[in-house]
Image: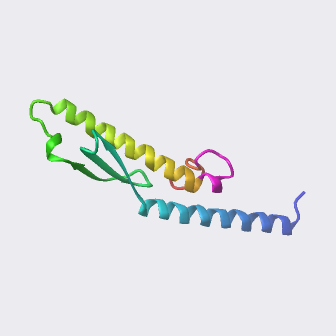
Amino acid sequence: MFGDTDMNALLEQAQAMQAQLQRAQEELAETEVTGTAGGDLVTATMNGSMELLKLDIKPEAVDPDDIEGLSDLVVAAVRDAHHNAQALASSKLGPMAGGMGDGLGLPGLGG
């Protein structure tokens, strides 16, 4: 069905794609994105691997009588950062995944 040359070429192509995806994942892990809420009162920083790295809360966001409001701002900022990290991952991995969504969840991606 397939000649040795065809199989070797297919294997080489698969290995090249895997190396590209690995490089893209390494870039994602090193790239930071932010999300904000409350007019920048709360800022969440994530990397492209969806890890929360930092959370900044400005003093004026802290109201002892409204802890629930602060909690909502934190959640909103983290969601915004997560959305931005997903968009980054999609832009980096999508083209290499051959149109298979954002490329996440493919075997061998370690995601």
The image shows residue 83, relative to residue 108, as above or below, that is above
Q: Which colour scheme is used?
A: rainbow
User: Residue at 38% across / 42% down in the picture?
Assistant: 80
Q: Residue 28: x percent and y percent?
A: 47, 59
In terms of image quadrants, where is residue 101?
top right
User: Residue at 44% across / 54% down in the picture?
Assistant: 49
- Asked whether, in this view, residue 86 is left or right of residue 55, the answer is right
Q: Is the magenta stretch mostly helix, strand or loop?
A: loop
Q: Farthest left residue? A: 64
Please state the extent of the stretch shown in magenta in the rendering.
94-102
* Quarter that holds the N terminus: bottom right
Most foreground residue, 41 or 69: 41
Q: Residue 109: x percent and y percent?
A: 55, 55
Most foreground residue, 29 or 45: 45
Q: Residue 44: x percent and y percent?
A: 31, 48
User: Residue at 44% across / 55% down in the picture?
Assistant: 48
Q: Does the magenta stretch include residue 7?
A: no
The image shows residue 21, relative to residue 34, as above or below, that is below
Most foreground residue, 49 or 58: 58
The image shows residue 48, relative to residue 72, as above or below, that is below
- Asked whether, in this view, residue 27 is left or right of residue 54, the answer is right
- Asked whether, in this view, residue 42 is left or right of residue 35, the answer is left
Q: Residue 97: x percent and y percent?
A: 64, 53
- Asked whether, in this view, residue 57 is left or right of residue 86, the answer is left
User: How many discs appear?
Assistant: 0
User: Residue at 32% across / 42% down in the picture?
Assistant: 77
